[in-house]
Amino acid sequence: MRIAPVKALLLAAILLAGNLVSTRAEAPLDPVTGFPREVSLKKEWKPGKKVAVCFLFYVEVWGFGQGPNFRPDMASRNPDLVDEAFRDYAINFGVPRVGSVFKEEDAPLSIALSGFFPGQQPEAWKKFRALQPNAAIVAHGMNNSSAQLPMGKGLIAQTTYVKQVLDLIEKDTGVRPKGWSSPSVYNNVDTFRACAANGMQYSLDAMDTDFLTVMTTPEGKLDLIPYPPVTVDMGQYLGRNLEPEDLEKLWINYVTELSREAEKNPDQPATVVAIGIHPFVVGSPNGAAAMRRTLEALKKLPNVWIADTDSLAAAGK
């Protein structure tokens, strides 16, 4: 039986719609949350740029006697002045030094900010923000010790906590963050839902991919910017005893290989990596020198885009 042209087009449209529904229904589920999570299929972030690199700088407070220890063998001392000096130096010298490096290199920077930092360290924040007035601000909890996410207390508790962090940062900085990075990289399924419930656009709590992915939570969609453990300086520095010069080599090799893969496979989705940096590591003079050399090397890769996280999330739309 011959089908009339109009009916044939209608049938084709119905079949296509059915295929789209079927495809969406088969979206892969995130293994941690069980929510649908799909890879962004963008081929490039901007003309000619296939690889995005976001440097996420952690501007944090811990509290006296709390935080990372440069000399764990001295942590039992009371007071532990060696490790306290390590933390204080990072705030007073490391934070502005990193701000200066990125300003002088004209490289975008994103700030993972503890909500308590501007209020507890007003002079340090004022000095740093003057160097980086336009850096994207990512909410990073209240602090990294005594006021972290209320894990195990349910969705309402986490939703309230996220809102309190956003409100505090907005009050003290004039900026309401669009992105989230959980303090101490410790989150659960409720964290993603709490972020979406508070209207956040993206999270850096995904650590298992090279691609921007989109998670559909019951409260809405949330972009997940990859934050792989291997690129974070703190774990490599304190846990594996790598020096900034070692991290310089690691970061350059990591991004250079992503760049090579993008050239070899032009049809694959654009890739992205968030590199976590801390003033304890790249805020020392030798750390800043390694950071500067890293930025200069990455800027020479023609298909690499150094971006802040807000810009990256906007480009992913």
Image (cartoon, rainbow, N blue to C red):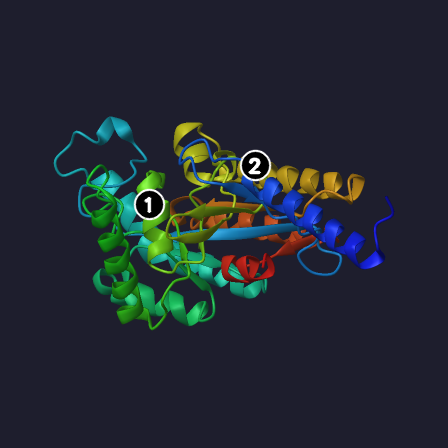
- Vertical placement of residue 209 versus 181, above or below: above
Residue 134 versus residue 88: which sits nearer the camera?
134
- Vertical placement of residue 288 versus 233, above or below: below
Question: Which residue is found at the position 62% from the left and 41% from the top?
Answer: 23
Residue 265 versus residue 40: which sits nearer the camera?
40
* Residue that carries the numbered disc 1 in the rendered image: 191
* Image spot of residue 217 (x, y percent): 41, 47
> What amino acid type is highlighted by mark number 1?
Thr
Residue, far right: 2
Residue, far front: 1
Front of the two marks 1 and 2: 2
> What amino acid type is highlighted by mark number 2?
Glu
* Image spot of residue 103 (x, y percent): 53, 65
* Residue that carries the numbered disc 2 in the rendered image: 26
Quarter of the image with the N terminus is: top right
Residue, far left: 78
Q: Quadrant of residue 311?
A: bottom right
Residue contact at pointers 1 and 2, CB within 8 angstroms: no
Tell me if I can see residue 232 in this picture: yes
10 Å neighbourhood of mark 2: few (<14), some, or many (≥20)?
Answer: few
Tell me if I can see residue 211 in this picture: no
Q: How many marks?
A: 2
Quarter of the image with the C terminus is: bottom right
> Along the polypeptide, which appears first: circle 1 or circle 2?
2
Question: Which residue is found at the position 13% from the left and 39% from the top?
Answer: 79
Question: Which residue is found at the position 60% from the left and 60% from the top?
Answer: 315
- Vertical placement of residue 285 versus 239, above or below: below
* Element carrying mark 1: helix
Residue 239 placement, left or right of 300: left
* Image spot of residue 24 (x, y percent): 57, 43
Distance from disc 1 to disc 2, alpha carbons, whole Å, reads 24 Å
